[in-house]
Image (cartoon, helix red, strand yellow):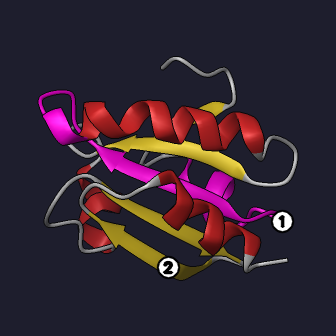
Amino acid sequence: MASANVKEFTDQNFEQEVIKSAEPVLVDFWAEWCMPCRMLAPTIDKIADSYSGKVKVGKVDTDANRDVSIKYGISAIPTVILFHNGQVAQKFVGMRNEKDFREALDALK
């Protein structure tokens, strides 16, 4: 992962890091073999850097973390889910523009 501000979420830490987080959390569900996921990675890194201290940003490797992927109905990747107060606030499936994520995050203020 390119940005130090992007965390790794797993089946084991998802509840603590995402659901119980006091700040909004943007979660990128991805896989190593997924080319669109790799194309989205720089955008996720940029968002993580821009919103550092305001929003937690992280990734879930869907191959290694099946439980959380199944729980949130991840059937296509990349899927990015914005969590706010432990709930799904918005779900983005497929390639999206940085603007889409910024609008969703800014709407939470």
**Does residue 32 sit above or below 85 in this rendering?**
above
**Residue 34 tag number:** none
Screen quadrant of the C terminus: bottom right
Identify the residue under disc 1: 22
Q: Is residue 9 visible?
A: no
User: In this view of the protein, which residue sits in the foreground, 34 or 65?
Assistant: 34
Provide the residue span drawn in magenta.
13-36
**Residue at (87% x, 44% y) in the render:** 53
Residue 17 lies within the magenta run: yes
**Residue at (12% x, 29% y) in the render:** 33
Identify the residue under disc 2: 90
**Does residue 85 sit above or below 70 in this rendering?**
below
Q: Nearer the viewer, mark 2 or mark 1?
A: 2
User: In this view of the protein, which residue sits in the foreground, 37 or 17?
Assistant: 37
Q: Is residue 70 left or right of residue 46?
A: left
Local SS, label 1: loop
